Image (spheres, grey):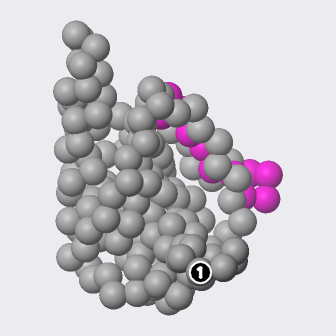
Amino acid sequence: MRALVQRVSTASVTVDDQTIGEIGPGLLILVCAMHDDSDDAARKLATKIPKLRIFRDDAGTMNQSLLDTGGAALVVSQFTLAADTSRGNRPGFSAAAPPDEGKRLYELFAAELATQGITVETGEFGADMAVALVNDGPVTIWMES
């Protein structure tokens, strides 16, 4: 499973001109299930991300986690994180999980975050979404499990 994690001041996702998910300070997490991912991969990533010490403490050092700050998470599916750009100019996406499995693992990931006491908002799997964010820092981290 792949994730692009961004520390944000605010973030939202809109589908058909309707905001379906919105958070204040926290993390925007773009997630892609890969072809050979398991439930364990989704759970492992969902357990690790809230513990990342990427939020500032009182001294201004990145030393606090999402759990420490009480921030929220906006989880958005993004199969393009599976892009293979090694040949030619058109990315290939065959490494992404099939849609049904990708949706299941995406929903499992979001549910696992919520079990840790994180307020979780989501996008809509497979929809044409507009994502807006204010990247705080900026802090952007690439993760795989």
Q: Nearer the viewer, residue 106 or 30?
A: 30
Residue 78 shown left or right of residue 145 in the figure? right
The C terminus lies in quadrant: bottom left
At x 60%, y 43%, the residue is: 12
Q: Is residue 36 above or below residue 40?
A: below
Q: Work out which residue is located at the far right of the displayed protein and give it.
A: 17
At x 59%, y 80%, the residue is: 87
Q: Main secondary structure of the magenta part?
A: strand
Residue pointed to by mark 1: 87
At x 40%, y 87%, the residue is: 35
The N terminus lies in quadrant: bottom left
> Image quarter for residue 61?
top left
Highlighted range, magenta: 8-18
The answer to whether one can see residue 125 in this image is: no
Q: Is residue 106 magenta?
A: no
- Could you say where residue 123 lies in the image, as x and y percent from the top left? 57, 59
Q: Is residue 97 above or below residue 128?
A: below
Q: Nearer the viewer, residue 69 or 84?
A: 84
Residue type at mark 1 is Arg
Crowding at dot 1, Cα within 10 Å, few <14 / some 14-19 / many 20+, comes out as: few
Q: Is residue 15 above or below residue 87?
A: above
